[in-house]
Each structure stands twice: as C-alpha cells, then as structure tokens.
Image: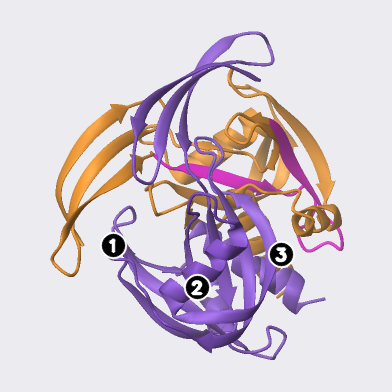
Chain colours: A orange, B purple
Amino acid sequence: MSLLSSRRIYTGRVLNLDLDAVRFPDGSVGELEMIRHQGASAVVPFTDDPRAPDPTVLMIRQFRHAADRYVWEIPAGRLDAGESPEACARRELEEEAGVTAEVLERLTTIYTTPGFTDERIHLFLATGLTAGTERRETDEFVEVHHLRWSQILESIEQGEIADGKTLIALLFVNTFRRRM
Amino acid sequence: MSLLSSRRIYTGRVLNLDLDAVRFPDGSVGELEMIRHQGASAVVPFTDDPRAPDPTVLMIRQFRHAADRYVWEIPAGRLDAGESPEACARRELEEEAGVTAEVLERLTTIYTTPGFTDERIHLFLATGLTAGTERRETDEFVEVHHLRWSQILESIEQGEIADGKTLIALLFVNTFRRRM
C-alpha cells in the first residue's frame, strides 16, 4: 500500500484528521480517513514488589466524555513535542498519581486502533514510588485509588475495567512479570 | 461533565468528527474533539480446545496504512447498522478467516482509546470452526496464519503483536480461559 496524496481536513488540539489517497496492493486507488495523534505513554505504578502475593497498584478513575461514564485507567497522557516516552510516563505519573518512580521498566508499545489512527501508546511498569508534588492539568478530574492485584483481575474479568491501554498493561504484567 | 452543544466537523465513511462543548466538574467550559465510530467486533478463533497444551489460533496479517507496516490481528471489523456484536463477529470471522464457528463466547467489551473516541470493540472467543466461503472485502488484503499459543505468547512478549484489541483478547483468554 502506498500513499499518493494527503489532505488535512482538520487541525486540532489533541488530533488532526487527514484524508489519504492510497494505492492498494491490487493496484486500485482509495481514500482512507486517518486520525493523526502524537502518541502517549501509560504506566502501571506498583507500591509493592510486583511479584508479591497480592501487590497494590495506583489506578485512576476519571469521567470520560467519549464513554459518558467514569473509567478505570492507569496514569497516562500524550507526549509533549520532543518528549521521550519515558519522560512522558514519569511526568504523567507525577501529574495524575502524585508520585515519582525509582525504576521505570518498558513493557511494550501498542497501536490503540490502527484501522483509523496512528496513535501509539508506550507502556511502562513503575516501582520504588515516592510521594511527589501533584500538578493536575485543568481538564483532568481524576481520583487516585489503591487497588489490590486480586481486585484488579476480578474487575477485568467482570468487564469493569474497559480501557484498552489499561487492560493491555495489566494483563501483560500478569502474564510476563508475575508468572515467570 | 455535561454536554452543552456538539458541532459536526466531518462526516466520513469510517468515522465522524465532532467538536463538543462540555461543562467540567469545576463549572468551567471547554471543547473536546470527539471521533464518533459505530463500534466493532473481534474474535479469537481456536482450531483446538483452548485448554489444550498448545492450541492453534487463526490470526491475520494485513498492511495497515496508519501503522505503515504489516500488523498481526485477530479477525475483526466494524458493526453494520443495526447489526449485533455477535452477528458482526461471525460475519468477520467468515470474511477474514474463511471459517464459521459452532460456539461464540463473549469475553469483554473495550474502549479502544477513550480520550478521543467512543469506539468500543466487543471481544469473542470462537471454537468448533468449519471452513466456510471466503468473501473478502475489497479494501482488505489479509493473510490467514495458523499460530500456536506458545508462539503467540512469545510474539506478544517480544512486541511483535502490537494491535490493541488483539493483545487484550489474547491476554484475556490466557488469563481467564486457559488458567482457571
């Protein structure tokens, strides 16, 4: 698939919308709607050793207009221009959960929904937390909660945790960092 | 958070873009960019019993313009108007993987990236597969592969599987349907 031309339809604060003309593998030409996004980082902050029997994680709960309800998430946010994924994860950890991390370990990087956006989210695991200075952004209204790992797994199975990046980061940790 | 007004910026084939004026919990007013999407279904198709020692799953590999590369995914696609999530999962399973399923089990429903879109994806597990009639959509160029569960887990850990819905469905199955 090759890009023939791209037309910017909308330039926004969080995202841009392009209409891309592309040539498909069979030679035909079509148009794809593409949401361009600068990417984000998200982090699973453990207050205990992740391999402890039932460790505690800091999770946030915020009202999401897109979902029209409160959503459980891990601390996360968009990359600033020129910011590294790790620096973004550390900044969002302090802004949203009010903590700094001694150790930040990279888990993986995901495409949130590659059918229509190039958004990628870099996922991290944080340990060695220390209470820092909370600097909350004005359009975020987040509560910080301490959840036990057993509660988290039950909430995932019951469908009470529904945010994509959050599910991937938690299930990735459960599969590859707790059971080895 | 309450919606004050909504302005349609773009009406497309796959998505619409709205600018929503909202009142935040502190009384202030702001504008949010919202991608409206009709939602989708995705399905993990097992050719063996999911609890067998190393079962096989049908996975697809397709070039994604948004990612500018080939991406590993499970069969998935958008809901048609009025279509149930289960009917959509069965249709996409036949269109993309060329099989029908005797049993379709619901796993969970996710928000792909609730910061800017209302898109939800309904995840299913399929067993009892029978080869059907493949009816591939013209803008999809997908290869079907048989992957062993052990290969899948290794690919996830190595970051070779990066699609959000695919990671959640596979790790959900691994956590709650294989280890109980």
Question: Which residue is under mark 2?
Answer: B93
The residue mark sitting in front, 3 or 1, is 1
Question: Horizontal and vertical percent for residue A98?
Answer: 70, 30
Q: Secondary structure at mark 1?
A: loop
Instruction: Judge whether residue B104 can be spotted in this image.
Output: yes
Q: Looking at this view, is A42 or A32 the one in front? A: A32
Q: Residue at x 55, y 70 (%)?
A: B90
Q: Secondary structure at mark 2?
A: helix
Q: Secondary structure at mark 3?
A: helix
Q: Which residues are magenta?
A: A38-62
Task: Tell me what residue is drawn at x 63 percent, y 22 percent.
Answer: A136
In the rendered structure, which amino acid carries the disc numbered 2? Leu
Residue B178 image offset from top left, x and y in percent: 73, 78
Rendering coords of residue A41 (x, y %): 52, 44
Question: Quick one: which residue is furthest to the front in this view?
Answer: B82
* Residue A43 sits inside the magenta stretch: yes
Which numbered dot is residue A148? none
Q: Which residue is mark 1?
A: B139
What is the x, y in percent for residue A54? 86, 58
Mark 1: which amino acid? Answer: Asp
Tell me how far mark 2 sits from mark 1, CA to CA: 16 Å
Position of residue B39 in the picture relative to residue A100 (left or right): left
